[in-house]
Amino acid sequence: MRPITASSRPTADRSPTYPRLSAYIARILRIPGVAETVNMDHIIRGYYSIETLNPTGITPAAPAHIERLLQLIA
């Protein structure tokens, strides 16, 4: 398994290729009260609004696998 670094953070395309990471996210989201506090739109807008992290201002869509997990758990 490849290490996750700031330059290779998981994206919508890469996270599902890390089955243990995906399983960990699913376990965390199943903890009572956690899924209700996850707002992917807010997380993405907040993270990508930091100019030093995102100098081009491009904001990606929410990771589809996280959205699916949130729907399954809800």
Image (tube, grey):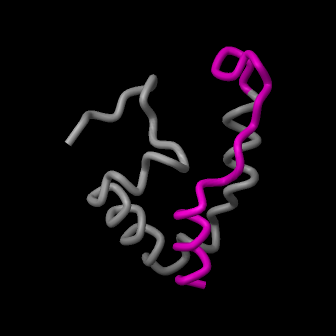
From this view, report whether residue 36 is shown above or below residue 20: below
Q: Residue furthest left?
A: 1
Secondary structure predominantly adopted by residues drawn in magenta? loop
* Relative side of 45 to 26, left or right: right
* Relative side of 23 to 39, left or right: left
Q: Position of residue 12 (x, y in %)?
A: 55, 50
For the image, the number of numbered tags is: 0
Q: Position of residue 15 (x, y in %)?
A: 43, 50
Residue 59 image-quadrant placement: top right
Q: Nearer the viewer, residue 39 or 23?
A: 23
Residue 36 image-quadrant placement: bottom right
Q: Position of residue 3 (x, y in %)?
A: 26, 34
What is the quadrant of the C terminus in the image?
bottom right
- What residue range appears in magenta? 50-74
Q: Position of residue 24 (x, y in %)?
A: 33, 62
From this view, report whether residue 53 is shown above or below residue 63: above
From this view, report whether residue 56 is shown above or below residue 17: above
From this view, report whether residue 20 is shown above or below residue 26: above
Q: Is residue 39 on the magenta stretch? A: no
Q: Is residue 54 on the magenta stretch? A: yes
Residue 41 image-quadrant placement: bottom right
* Relative side of 35 to 7, left or right: right
